[in-house]
Image (spheres, rainbow, N blue to C red):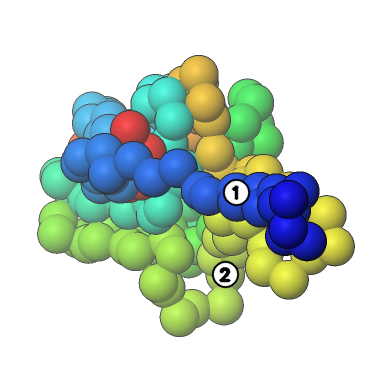
Amino acid sequence: MGLLSSFTILLTMAIFSHARPGVATVARRVIVKDGFTQAGNVDFEIEQPANSVIDNVFWRQLKAPTFATAMDVKFTLGYTAGATDVLDTGVDGIADGASTIAEGYILDMKGNTGTDITYTFQYSADDAAAPAAAPGFSSTGRDLHARVTCTDDVVTVNGDYEVTVVFKVFE
């Protein structure tokens, strides 16, 4: 036997899978009719699908409300009731001393350049010593908790709005 006959080479190779479709964008929306209340909250839930991460949130005014003098409207979204884990518009992020909110008013929470909205990044942070799961990711699905808070002003004509949450779903 030669010198190289007792030499064994061990190769390790990655295993690949070309699964389809990959990441899909889906959205869930809730339409709230008569969604403003004087000095109070309107609470509702939006279902987050399994194996998804929150990508963005939109507000769209469907029917304009009218307020007696000057209404402030706040919107929050979180993982538990009343929480602001995902976003907080501040006390007047939707309306600031408004007498109405125009039909067709659309607010992009993630891409908004205003100063009132605090949108918390929902993906994992890069360059970490111990990479953590994305805070906006749910492997089993869950309910997200939304809250609309109005200041103490009379709602003379109530309005309707929709809240849409966009998710990236990993199949």
Picture layout, residue 97 above or below residue 13? below
- The kind of residue tagged 1 is Thr
Question: In the structure shown, which secondary structural element does the residue marked by tag 1 occupy?
Answer: loop
Residue 77 placed where, x, y %? 54, 41
Q: Which residue is mark 2?
A: 116
Marks 1 and 2: which is nearer the front? 1
Using a 10 Å C-alpha cutoff, classify the residue at mark 1 as few (fewer than 14 neighbours), some (14 to 19) or many (20 or more).
few
Left or right for 21, reference 51 = left
- The kind of residue tagged 2 is Asp
Q: Nearer the viewer, residue 56 or 126?
A: 126
Which residue is at a point 54% across and 38% down the rendered structure image? 137
Using a 10 Å C-alpha cutoff, classify the residue at mark 2 as few (fewer than 14 neighbours), some (14 to 19) or many (20 or more).
some
Left or right for 108, reference 162 = right
Question: In the structure shown, which secondary structural element does the residue marked by tag 2 occupy?
Answer: loop
Left or right for 41, reference 9 = left
Residue 51 placed where, x, y %? 44, 30
Residue 4 in view: yes
Whether pointer 1 and pointer 2 mark residues with C-beta atoms closer than 8 Å, the reply is no
Which residue is at a point 24% across and 61% down the rendered structure image? 106
Left or right for 152, reference 95 = right
Instruction: For marks 1 and 2, give the CA distance.
Output: 53 Å
What label does residue 12 carry, if any? Answer: 1
Which residue is at a point 45% across and 42% down the rendered structure image? 15
Residue 39 placed where, x, y %? 56, 36
Picture layout, residue 160 above or below residue 106? above
